[in-house]
Image (cartoon, rainbow, N blue to C red):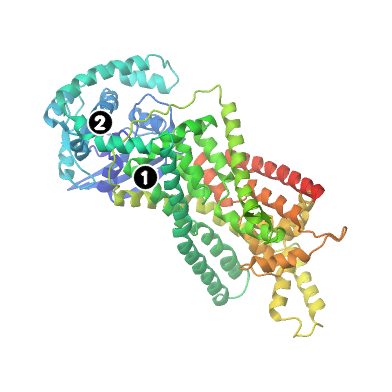
Amino acid sequence: MANRIALIGNPNCGKSTLFNLLTGLRQKISNLPGTTVEQKQGKWQAGNNSYTLLDLPGIYSLYSESDDEKVVVNSLLGLEQSELPDKILFILDASNLRRNLLLFSQVAELKLPMAVLLTMNDTAHRKNLAVSTEKLESTLGVPVVKINPRKGEGIVEIHSAVANARVSVLQMIGNTGERLYAFVTGGKKEGIAAETLSRYAHIEKIVAACLHSNEAAGKSWRATLDYWLTHRIFGYLIFASIMLTIFQGVFTFAEYPMSWIEQGFAMLGEWAANTMPQGAFSSLISQGLIPGIAGVVVFVPQIAILFLFIGLLEDSGYMTRASFITDRTMRRIGLNGRSVIPLISGFACAIPSIMATRSIKHKGERLATMFVIPLMSCSARLPVYTLLISLAIPESAGFGPFSLRSVIMTLAYFAGIIAAVCISLFFKKRNQNTETSEFILEMPTYQVPRIQTVLVQMSQKCMSFITSAGKVIVVISMILWWLSSYGPGNAIEIAETDVYRTTQKIPADLYSDEQRSIDLAEARLEASYAGHLGKFIEPAIQPLGYDWKTGIAIISSFAAREVFVGTMATLFRGREDNPETIRDVMKQTTNPETGKPLYGLPYALSLMIFYAYALQCMSTIAVMRRETGGWKWPLIQFTAFLALAWISAWLVFNLTSVLL
């Protein structure tokens, strides 16, 4: 029995909504062979019959070279390990019949059994459009069924349409399969524009026969809304307001669940440490595995909230308009309009932002966007900036009407933006001799977002992050635990003995058990492999004004940038929740050779610029590896940003040391 059915259609035609409705939670998502494009596959139980549904990416034409469009072609031709579908359900947007029929005419000539599901009928009605299903079915030669997946209407009739699916009688050009195979395998590509024009000549006749239109009567309010949303000035102001709301929402709404997750895992780690027998295994679980899992799960609220907002904007029809108004600006630096959402979202967290670049069709532009997103100063850098600014800048210092601290903080954010623009221009220059992407938009109709669809897509993105990037994050966290818990030979035992020997004669009223615990933690860290690694890299970071303790903090913050503050709290006997206590101890530390403050303004500014540029977030590296399909680009990105960070920090440290 034919049971493998492919869903094909234009973007925003209701295909994914139908797929989610038919399959429910019986879905699995995996990357298609040789690409980073996700394939959604699910089971549809219709009475006694069970079908495998394949939700192929939405496309406008089979003749294209973006990853998702190639996936559809490969599936229809059985190329690159793809399995041919037994039948096709073509989702046809009744409110945009002319555009949708172009893709249908190409698919029809591949001679696979088909049925048409007519969606967006309520939208067509609002636009005073009426499609005759009888005439359309007669013209196309395949079953045509009106459905509304948002309301669950017409779902029962789909089973009958599948049973009666047949090869379409519509033949406009012929030999599409051979021409398409030649196109995707590197053959002749000229003549496609002429073929498209020829198809549209036939399509106009079909539309004239099957569509009754009084579209002008329904355009007034949509035209007014489009005028303001795409206005050369007000369009940007509206877009900025919406993005500010989203940006603030990601910060505000994620704060409490992230705090609860951190507290919950901290309690779990404490419980494991107190309940399990003391030893290496207990330490591995409480200080390695549990914090590693926490480092994955803690990002889920930000990912969920960001993709919830993006899903609502996409489903409402606004996202296309946002891409339209920003395209000209983005294209000047080698990106396109779809890059702006991920870039702005990068100020909250780079991880969901890199995942959000999947909407960018062109490989080069998507890669350039992913590459520069980590330069947007994310929320994890904020604790580092706060500590360093409070260390070096007096609270009373001002710059005109503004606090000098706020000015320095703003400059740290702009440093990342400027670097991102320069690197994007480099990508543009590098790709100037290659074919650039087209950015042809047809504005989708406005509609009320379907919450169920948005929530399903949001949960899929979260699970994709947990199951893929999470594996790498947990492994690296456990490696960092091992490096900070063990040392060569009996170095840690010797360090502990030295602490006890040095402090045993100090009166109890002058030296508390809490202070001894802090000293022991510092001694263990210095004697560990992480401490030795800090000493080892000290010659490389000394020109930047850093010592081995800063080196340890830099290494430990690969788990998460904000770990820098906790490490410095341990090293300088402060409290992690109060940067002022760390600052006071650091401020009193002097360079033994010069007698000058070791952690002064040159040190603080140098380290801020280092953290602004260096790619130190292993979660970001893991997501980059997943999204690019390998380690090549994450390693290039890590190396390039590390070099940029070192050179910039060296310049800042030496210039400020001379000037101050």
**Local secondary structure at mark 1:** helix
> Residue 348: where, in percent of width, then height?
51, 51
Which image quadrant is residue 324 in?
A: top left
Residue 535 to residue 138: above or below: below
Residue 209 to residue 325: above or below: above
Mark 1 residue type? Leu
Q: Which residue is mark 2?
A: 96
Mark 1 Cα-neighbour bin, 10 Å: few <14, some 14–19, many ≥20: some
Label 2, label 1: how many angstroms apart (C-alpha)? 20 Å
Camera-nearest residue between 516 and 545:
545
Q: Which residue is mark 1?
A: 313
**Local secondary structure at mark 2:** helix
> Residue 238: where, in percent of width, then height?
41, 43
Tag 2 near tag 1, CB within 8 Å: no
Camera-nearest residue between 116 and 132:
132
At x 40%, y 30%, the residue is 70
> Residue 441: where, in percent of width, then height?
37, 30
> Residue 131: where, in percent of width, then height?
16, 31
Can residue 145 be seen?
A: yes
At x 70%, y 65%, the residue is 583
At x 74%, y 46%, the residue is 652
Can residue 560 be seen?
A: no
Mark 2 residue type? Asn
* Residue at the far front in the pictured view: 401
* Residue at the far left in the pictured view: 134
Q: Is residue 152 left or right of residue 569?
A: left
Mark 2 Cα-neighbour bin, 10 Å: few <14, some 14–19, many ≥20: some
Q: Is residue 288 left or right of residue 258?
A: right
Camera-nearest residue between 33 and 209:
209
Q: Is residue 16 left or right of residue 555?
A: left
Upstream in sequence: badge 2 or badge 1: 2
